[in-house]
Amino acid sequence: MENSAIIKLTNLYKRYTVGNGEFIALKNINLSFGKGEFAGLVGPSGSGKTTLLNIIGSLDIPSDGTAEVMGQSVSALTAKQSAWLRNYHIGFIFQTYNLLPVYNVFENVEFALLLQKMSATDRRKSVMETLEWVGLTDKAKSKPSQLSGGECQRVAIARAMVKRPSIVLADEPSANLDSANSHHIVQTMKKLNQELNTTFIFATHDEKVMQHLDRIIRLKDGEVEQ
Amino acid sequence: MLSLKLAFRNLIGAGLRTWLNVSVLSVAFVVMVFYNGMLDGWNRQAHDDTINWEVGGGQLWHPLYDPFDLLGLQEAHGVIENQAKKLIGQKQITPVLVTQGSIFPHGRMQNILLKGVQPEQEIIGLPTSNLVSHAGQEIPAMIGKRMALFTNLKKGDNVLVRWRDKNGTFDAREFNIVEIFNSNVPTVDNGQIYLPLNTLQEMTGMIDEATLFVAATNYTGGNFDEWQFKSPKYLLKEIDEIIKSKKAGSAVIYILLLSIALLAIFDTQVLSIFRRQREIGTYIAMGMTRSQVVRIFTVEGAAHSLLALGLAAIYGTPLLYLLQKNGIPISQTFDSLGVSIASKIIPVYAFAMIVLSILLVVVSATIVSYFPARKIARMKPTDALKGKIQ
């Protein structure tokens, strides 16, 4: 596993204005993640896990400090550049799956490639290969409403992985799943991490997920616990 | 292309709500095409009939002739000189002498216009040849079906007619109704009696005189002597204005329908943007720019109009074709408008009118979809992903 940092967070702060006051969601975060890491941000609700994932995913920007992703400062990116970064280098997995309900499994996974303007033949090949990884080739034509929670999350993993991103950000991916499904999901992601050398960063407080993590970063009240 | 593809998938996926919006919009479109087609059909029929029955290729008026000044008719006549005679011989024009008179059908007096026409003329559609075949009887006269209805006169009836000659002296005689013609043009019918030109000239002492000439459709001569040429466009101005005002009035109906449909689309779009916050956040997380998402939602709203046009084509084409084939029956009470109207109107669906209607539907649906979609541009993707935006 390579260890060159593809994510580098330096003196990072995130503040929100609440009424007349200020809420500090992240305080002086200094972290870096290497290529192929399988790491987790662990901590109770409100500890800043999702905020940190959003900044890494360039969905948000830090109030202070720098967040460098793939060598680019998130704060300096234009809307178009950050969209490009997410499109080609970052995959997201959400707690609530966020599948597009009117599309079937194949189309949900294919969507990420449509944005990359890939040819139909290449798209089909990539989607079917990815569905095979997550064991859902037989469900390609099913709508999300016809799938179980575990299957939905596997579709979400396939959607994140189909474009072969450098980084996958998974926000509480097992929170809505039972322990068997939760285990299966993490195993799937671990396998992909090893086979494709993709960096996985989880936000979780699920002990069963933590067991599989190579690195655990504990957050409390917006700070990294030493 | 991607936006269009996604928009259609989302629309079809939205099911019943989409089809309700699309149905109302398609009805608005079909009604719009139908109304415009009907009015264009009426316009064309009114023009054709009025040209055929009354206006011809234009008219040449005596300088004192004013169709709205009945008292001035006494002076509005002139001698048919050589040039006019030549043109009459060439069947380029036909003279009409107009004078005031009164009839006494069943003992009641009614003011009328007496019109002297050449029985052999072929320039306008009045069946004047009937006045020839009955020559030699009392005074052969011809009236229209409306006049016959109003005066309760039938073919073969005699009616007492009183008139003044050129010196203002009253005279009266019995006319024999030899023909009741059926015309869609009320202005050649109501309050008018037609008789042979020579007879009226003799009756009034206006020998060899006319009030106006009706020109053939291929007439290109313009003014001559004292006669002033009035083009068909000038003579049909009144019809054009009546139809224009009818068009404006009927536009209210389809604008109302279109507004209901557009309001439904606007409402759906506003709801969509709030209900589908997570989806919007997901699009952005997957690498779409906000403007791309705005475009998807705008295209999605606008795509209602494309589906509506498709649906309208499915049921509207046979329906409108059927109406065109069979015509639309029109109540004769429309006669009171004073404009030519047939018992059936054949709608005319002009290509330009259909294209304009399509553009109106598509552009207005796009505009009402764009305004709610603009809200997306102000959304924070992190809040959208959580569905937190109120």
Image (cartoon, helix red, strand yellow):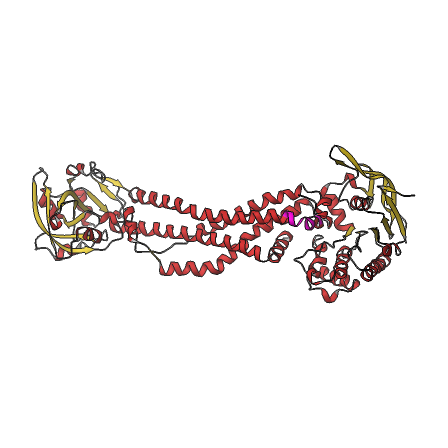
- Queried whether the magenta region covers residue B341, the answer comes back as no
Residue furthest to the right: A226
Q: Which residues are magenta?
A: B273-281
- Across and down, in percent, residue A197 comes to 85, 55
Side (left or right) of B64 relative to B281: left
Q: Quadrant of residue A14?
A: top right
- Across and down, in percent, residue A223 comes to 86, 41
Quadrant where the C terminus of chain B is found in the figure: top right
Does residue B117 appear in the picture of this structure? no
Which residue is at a point 41% across and 60% down the rendered structure image? B321
Does residue B370 appear in the picture of this structure? yes
- Queried whether the magenta region covers residue B274, the answer comes back as yes
Side (left or right) of B38 relative to A72: left
Residue furthest to the top: A20
Vertical placement of A76 versus A147: above or below?
Answer: above
In the foreground, B381 or B34: B381
- Across and down, in percent, residue B383 comes to 72, 44
